[in-house]
Image (cartoon, helix red, strand yellow):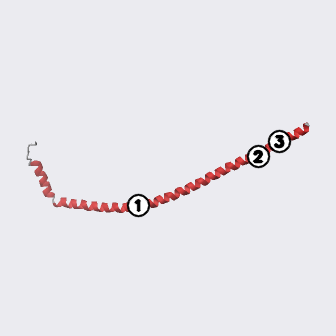
Amino acid sequence: MSAQNSTGIQTLLDAEREASKIVQKAREYRTKRVREARDEAKKEIDAYRADKEAEYKDFEAQHTQGNKAAEDEANKEADGKIAEIQEAGKANQDKIIKDLLSAVFDAHPAPVS
């Protein structure tokens, strides 16, 4: 009976070792699969990010062109107005200086109520 018990115990130990190997393989497979899934997800995220960045750059380029045109138009208009003001200042420079000097030197005090 002891030989039979010894054989039964040996069979159980062999079965336990085999089960341990199967569990270890399952863990390795799961770890490998998790790693693969993570890498795959990272690739998808990178591709999505690149796609959205390209969309944003296209959107920005389209809308910046409109802003650039408006900015150029405003700059032209402002330059024109500045030129007008400078010409008016040059044309009336003597009168403006005379009026300023007259206002400073010919004071007419008036009571404030």
The type of residue carrying mark 2 is Lys
Whole-percent x and y of residue 74? Answer: 31, 60
Q: Decide if residue 44 is on the left or right side of residue 55.
A: right
Whole-percent x and y of residue 19? Answer: 77, 45
Above or below, comparing residue 58 to residue 103 in the picture: below
Q: Earlier in the sequence, mark 2 or mark 3?
A: 3
Q: Which residue is drawn at the image coordinates 74% and 46% (left, top)?
A: 23
Disc 2 crowd rating (10 Å Cα; few below 14, some 14-19, many 20+) is: few
The residue pinned by badge 2 equals 21
Q: Earlier in the sequence, mark 2 or mark 1?
A: 2
Q: Nearer the viewer, mark 2 or mark 3?
A: 3
Nearest the viewer among 70 and 86 is 70
Whole-percent x and y of residue 69? Answer: 35, 63
Q: Which residue is drawn at the image coordinates 15% and 59% (left, top)?
A: 92
The quarter of the picture where the N terminus appears is: top right
The type of residue carrying mark 3 is Leu
Q: Earlier in the sequence, mark 1 or mark 3?
A: 3
The type of residue carrying mark 1 is His
The residue pinned by badge 3 equals 12
Marks 2 and 3, how far apart at CA: 14 Å
Secondary structure, mark 1, is helix
The residue pinned by badge 1 equals 63
The quarter of the picture where the C terminus appears is: top left
